[in-house]
Amino acid sequence: MYSSVAENISQVTSRIRAAEKAAGRIPGIVQLIAVSKTRSANEVRNAVMAGAQHIGENYLQEALDKQAELSDLDITWHFIGPVQSNKTRTIADHFDWVHSVDRWKIAKRLNDQRKTAATPLNVCIQVNVSDETTKSGVSLDELPELAAQINELPNLKLRGLMAIPSPDQSNEDLAADFARMQQSLNELNELGLALDTLSMGMSGDIELAIAAGSTMVRVGTAIFGPRNYSKPDTDKK
Ligand SMILES: *Cc1c(COP(=O)(O)O)cnc(C)c1O
């Protein structure tokens, strides 16, 4: 059955508030990011009209096209995809947050290319928490050193950690990954950093992530429906 983006946002928001309550979290502490990769500018507009002010995008050119079409709206833009070093200047110019910083070179370039007159770019370090197939993300071993280095960069504001755990695991293993993230954040804060963000939880695991301390959930499918990556004119026979 068809349900609108607005209805879906209202349902996802209810899930978030219920999960906060069940976990004894502060009501309203978890920020919803609507992830709109592959969706049209008009679908994003509908989501913003329905109250989703934070929008997450994975692919730079696709994001820039939508930003141009939606410049009349007040949107906080989050870059959540892999960052190529030849794209850092444009990303530093066009986004409020980058969740997927996973190496020094990228952090340094974003810092150097962020216009100093602008506010610092909010960044999270992407952690390879499931420690397997996914190539993105710094290992837990390398995290403290990278975090300490990034924390010194004047044009970046290191806000916290992001993870995309392996989806092919039991809820127990997923919960263990999320718990490791929470613990890593605590350890960094004990070392003197002041991190307030855990970006974790997607359509299928919002509740598990919030129970483990997530402060930002990145939700695509539960808002916009299943993604279709094939081109409209592709012969699918
Ligand atoms: C696509 C994507 C999401 C959203 O995933 P859904 O399962 O559709 O909610 C979240 N985070 C990242 C990094 C993504 O690429």
Image: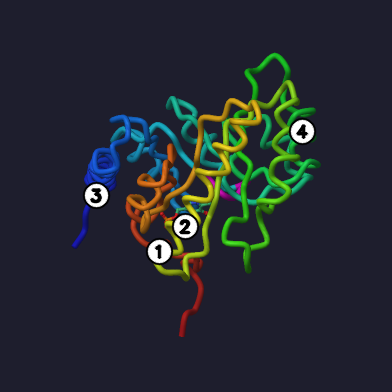
As displayed, is residue 190 above or below residue 214? Answer: above
Name the residue type under label 3: Ser
**Nearest-to-viewer mark from 4 and 2:** 2
Label number found at residue 149: 4
Q: Secondary structure at mark 1?
A: helix
Q: Residue at x 31, y 32 (%)?
A: 51
Q: Earlier in the sequence, mark 4 or mark 3?
A: 3
Label number found at residue 176: 2
The stretch in magenta equals 57-61
* Disc 3 within 8 angstroms of ligand 1 (CB): no
Name the residue type under label 2: Ala
Q: In the rendered structure, does residue 6 fall within the stretch colored magenta?
A: no
Q: Crowding near pointer 2: few (<14 within 10 Å), some, many (20+)?
A: some
Asked whether disc 1 touches disc 3, contact meaning CB atoms under 8 Å apart, the reply is no
Asked whether disc 2 touches disc 3, contact meaning CB atoms under 8 Å apart, the reply is no
Q: Residue at x 47, y 65 (%)?
A: 167
| Residue 213 quadrant | top left
Judging depth in this view, the residue of 166 and 39 nearest the camera is 166
Residue under numbered circle 1: 172
Tell me how far mark 4 sits from mark 3, CA to CA: 44 Å
| Residue 32 quadrant | top left
